[in-house]
Image: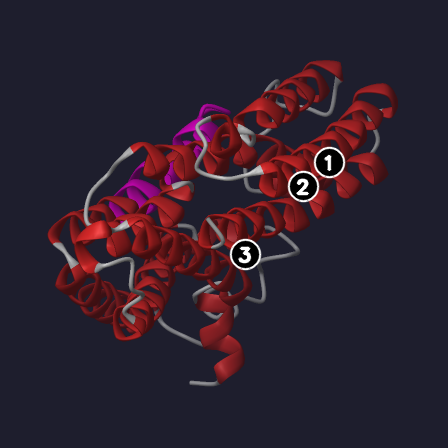
Amino acid sequence: MKWKDFSKLIKFRLTFLVVFSASVTFLIGSKANAATGHVINWKHWAMLVVGGFLVTGAANCFNEIIEKDLDKLMKRTKDRPIPAGHMTTGQALILGLGMALAGTYLLGYLNLPTGILSVFSILFYAFAYTPLKRISPIAVFVGAIPGALPPLIGYVAGYGTIDEIALIVFGIQFVWQFPHFWAIAWVLDDDYKLAGFRLLPTGKRDVGSAVFTFISTLVLVPVSLLPTFYHYGGYWVGGVSLVCGLVFLYLATLLLIKRDILSARRVMFASFFYLPVVQLMFLFDFLGK
């Protein structure tokens, strides 16, 4: 098996972003954990990174197994290893199960809640969100739940349990996913329709879908200020989050006005930058307290 095929099977870039998110919030959780003297256990951080990579890769692997026949229909996915004939479903299943077992073991070793959340994320992503994509746009809401679990998992791995900060980092990533997903769905709508995927709020590129995207981006602005509001972060994270949120909102406004693919693509790329910038700023601000 070539690295190129394995990379596509686990959706490497997506997996990397997920693990990055979890690794940042692990550091925040470790800093918040008074029981450990606010000391970062780098061995546990490495276990989280490896375990998170395996769990996320497994979830993406199961997703591609389930959608193998649909992937053949779309231009952007027809070269994935299973539809392209570079890998059998059985081979992918063995890889997926191996990664899932190894990943949940590593995360469960850190603490039980982290292990349970990791199992839930795999099951919810592969067996709830994946089949819903062809049934209803509600799939985006369902998918936003496992999609927002990485920062929660990372924080719980460092802190040990779910507290107010854990809910805040979950909430920011949960709300962020709506403009992120809908912008992607707008750009790729023609390709998605070839497989029968229904991801835009109204099912098509229209003013309704643009309004939903705008509203979700608008909601993200105050949600991203929660770390400052609850005094877990200072003015730095608040200021950066506000600026990023307003830029994001401006681009969503242009999409609402123009309703074209170019505007949606700008929202999509803005979403890629928004989340890591806000999370890193929260980390640096929190570590400096």
Residue 1, given in percent of the width and then of the height, sits at: 42, 85
- Residue 217 figure quarter: top right
Q: How many marks?
A: 3
Residue 23, given in percent of the width and then of the height, sits at: 41, 60
Q: Is residue 126 magenta?
A: yes
**Residue drawn 86% across the image and 20% down it:** 257
The CA distance from mark 2 to mark 1 is: 5 Å
**Residue drawn 61% across the image and 23% down it:** 203
Q: Residue 179 versus residue 134: which sits nearer the camera?
A: 179
What is the three-letter code of the residue carrying label 3? Lys
Answer above or below: position of 170 versus 101: above
Q: Which residue is mark 3?
A: 72
What is the three-letter code of the residue carrying label 1? Val
Q: Which residue is mark 2?
A: 240
Q: Nearer the viewer, mark 1 or mark 3?
A: 1
Q: Is residue 131 left or right of residue 173?
A: left
Q: Which span is picked out in magenta? A: 122-144
SS class, disc 3: loop
What is the three-letter code of the residue carrying label 2? Val
The CA distance from mark 3 to mark 2 is: 42 Å
Residue 194 visible to the viewer: no
Q: Which residue is mark 1?
A: 243
